[in-house]
Image (cartoon, grey):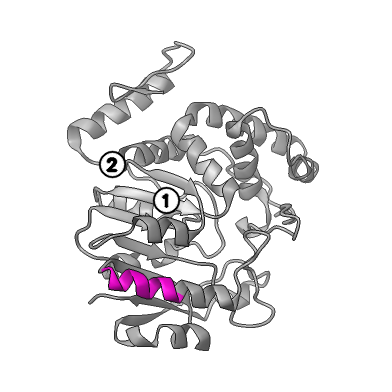
């Protein structure tokens, strides 16, 4: 737990590893500089590859940051650690399992690390069998930390870090055939936990419209990274929940973008370079940048390159 700006361990043990975490927090408090951290999960469409472009287009100053399609959170972690920005963060997603994992990292990272190490050892003994057994174990959890450990372990060992569910909401991504994946990166998990605490992160499992329309106000920086509009009929990997994200959903998002613009929020959005997206945001064409990107979910490596994405702003 966090007490008087220090980590207090429930078991009372003072191991060198635990004191290292305490010292890390003390150093942050004294130096006002966040230790570097990065996404603790893999996420299809993650923005690590575009961080330089996104940061170059982000507003220079802001006090509140919203990311309602949080996914792996690459831009959030980059802003708060690599660039040492200070702000209150509103992090959300409609994917309840994803949000639960963020809560677990924030609330009890040491217990989570212990469980993930157990998952890592189990995977090493029988990788494919362990993966499918873990995937089928969908509802047997004593608490939200156990549920998060399963989610993270599956994410680190499934095909390309893809999150996909069927119409019943059951995770159905096949095994990724990794020989020795890093399931438990304890150092980064601890740094992420500190980042979530000291950004005063408000974490919610919620629809983006609810979070933004009820809370966003003038001067807020909002980054929208929705499930992408598919570039072809065979590229429809938007089923992060059992309801998917349709063309109609894209149109509703564009309406929210305009509402936020009227509120004088600073909105940055990324999406596929498709005819639909260009049409929806044609009013912001002067502040639209096209960039090259890789699509890591394609099973053929040769088809992962050569994709275009749009970065759209409502400000100069």
Question: Label 2's element?
Answer: loop
Instruction: Please give the label number shown on residue 34.
Output: 2
Measured as percent of width and height from the top left, residue 68 is found at: 44, 58
Q: Nearer the viewer, residue 251 or 62?
A: 251
The question of residue 70 being in magenta is answered with no
Q: Nearer the viewer, residue 265 or 182?
A: 265
In the rendered image of this protein, does residue 95 appear above or below residue 130? below
Q: Among all residues in the image, which is located at the extreme top?
A: 12
Residue at 50%, 56% in the rendered image? 71
Can the viewer see residue 280 in this picture?
yes
The question of residue 257 being in magenta is answered with yes
Camera-side mark, 2 or 1: 1
Instruction: Please give the label number shown on residue 29.
Output: none
Q: State the CA–CA distance, disc 2 to disc 1.
A: 18 Å
The reply to whether dot 2 and dot 1 touch (C-beta < 8 Å) is: no
Instruction: Please give the label number shown on residue 91.
Output: 1
Quadrant, the N terminus = top left
In the rendered image of this protein, does residue 268 appear above or below residue 31? below
Main SS of the magenta part reads helix
Q: Nearer the viewer, residue 90 or 42?
A: 90
Instruction: Give, as a single range, the part of the protein colored magenta.
Output: 254-263
Measured as percent of width and height from the top left, residue 63 is found at: 23, 53
Residue at 41%, 13% in the rendered image? 14
Instruction: State which tag comes first along the sequence, 2 or 1.
Output: 2
Taking the image as shown, residue 66 lies to the left or right of residue 87, namely right
Question: Label 1's element?
Answer: strand
In the rendered image of this protein, does residue 67 appear above or below residue 295? above
């Amino acid at each position: 737990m966090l007490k008087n700006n220090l980590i207090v361990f429930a078991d009372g043990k003072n191991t060198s590893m635990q004191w290292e975490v305490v010292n890390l927090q003390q150093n942050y408090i004294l130096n006002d500089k966040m230790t570097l951290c990065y996404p603790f999960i893999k996420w299809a469409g993650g923005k690590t590859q575009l961080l330089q472009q996104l940061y170059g287009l982000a507003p220079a100053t802001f006090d509140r940051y919203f990311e309602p399609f949080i996914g792996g959170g690459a831009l959030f972690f980059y802003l708060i650690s690599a660039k040492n920005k200070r702000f209150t963060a509103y992090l959300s997603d409609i994917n309840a399992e994803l949000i639960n994992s963020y809560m677990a990292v924030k609330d009890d990272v040491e217990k989570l690390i212990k469980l993930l190490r157990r998952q890592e050892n189990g995977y090493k003994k029988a990788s494919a069998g362990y993966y499918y057994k873990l995937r089928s174990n969908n509802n047997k959890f004593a608490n939200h930390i156990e549920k998060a450990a399963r989610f993270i372990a599956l994410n680190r060992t499934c095909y390309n870090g893809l999150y996909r569910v069927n119409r019943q909401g059951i995770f159905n991504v096949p095994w990724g055939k990794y020989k020795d994946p890093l399931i438990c990166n304890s150092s980064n998990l601890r740094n992420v936990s500190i980042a979530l605490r000291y950004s005063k992160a408000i974490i919610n499992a919620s629809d983006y419209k609810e979070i933004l329309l009820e809370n966003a106000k003038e001067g807020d920086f909002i980054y929208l990274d929705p499930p992408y509009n598919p570039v072809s009929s065979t590229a429809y990997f938007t089923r992060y929940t059992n309801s998917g994200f349709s063309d109609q959903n894209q149109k509703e998002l564009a309406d929210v973008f305009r509402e936020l613009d009227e509120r004088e929020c600073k909105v940055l959005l990324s999406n596929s370079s498709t005819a639909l997206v260009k049409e929806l945001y044609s009013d912001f064409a002067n502040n639209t940048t096209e960039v090259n990107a890789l699509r890591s979910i394609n099973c053929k490596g040769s088809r992962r390159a050569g994709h275009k994405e749009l970065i759209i702003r409502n400000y100069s």
